[in-house]
Amino acid sequence: MFIFESLIWLVNTICFILYIALIIRIIMSWVGADPYNEIAQLIYSITEPILAPFRALPLRIGAVDFSPILAFFALRLVNSFLVWFIVRVAGVFM
């Protein structure tokens, strides 16, 4: 049972880190952070694979881009599904 609890912790931790990275990226876009900064490049490299599919959708209204909001919902959905799946698999082995 310990392995499943560890997997759930790992999934939740990774998703939490991605949430924080998305929030930092949003704040960086508001304050106009230097895109050549090493930390900014790290945040961009972490979040771009998540945001890129949503940027292909017409989610921009004026200067406001709603793709991060949809990315938050999708990430939460993936997190919930993975935890649910791990719990179901753990139930089989009990």
Image (cartoon, rainbow, N blue to C red):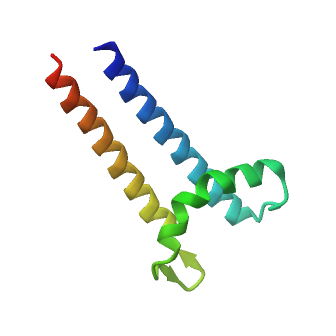
Of 28 and 21, the residue lying toward us: 21
Query: Residue 35: where, in percent of width, then height?
Result: 80, 62
Query: Residue 92: where, in percent of width, then height?
Result: 14, 24
- Decide if residue 55 is in sight here: yes
Which quarter of the image is occupied by the C terminus?
A: top left
User: In the figure, is residue 7 to the left or right of 13?
Assistant: left
User: In the figure, is residue 16 to the left or right of 3?
Assistant: right
* Residue drawn where x is 56% and y is 77% of the image: 64
Q: Residue furthest top?
A: 2
* Residue drawn where x is 62% and y is 51% of the image: 46
Q: Residue furthest front?
A: 93
Quadrant in the rendering for residue 51: bottom right
Say if 77 sits above or below 82 in the image. Answer: below
* Residue drawn where x is 41% and y is 52% of the image: 75
Query: Residue 88: where, in percent of width, then height?
Result: 18, 32
Of 92 and 66, the residue lying toward us: 92
Say if 55 sits above or below 68 in the image. Answer: below
Which quarter of the image is occupied by the N terminus?
A: top left
User: In the figure, is residue 76 to the left or right of 67?
Assistant: left
Say if 51 sits above or below 38 in the image. Answer: below
Total label count? Answer: 0
* Residue drawn where x is 74% and y is 63% of the image: 31
- Decide if residue 66 is in sight here: no
Query: Residue 23: where, in percent of width, then height?
Result: 58, 52
User: In the figure, is residue 37 to the left or right of 48?
Assistant: right
Say if 54 sits above or below 85 in the image. Answer: below
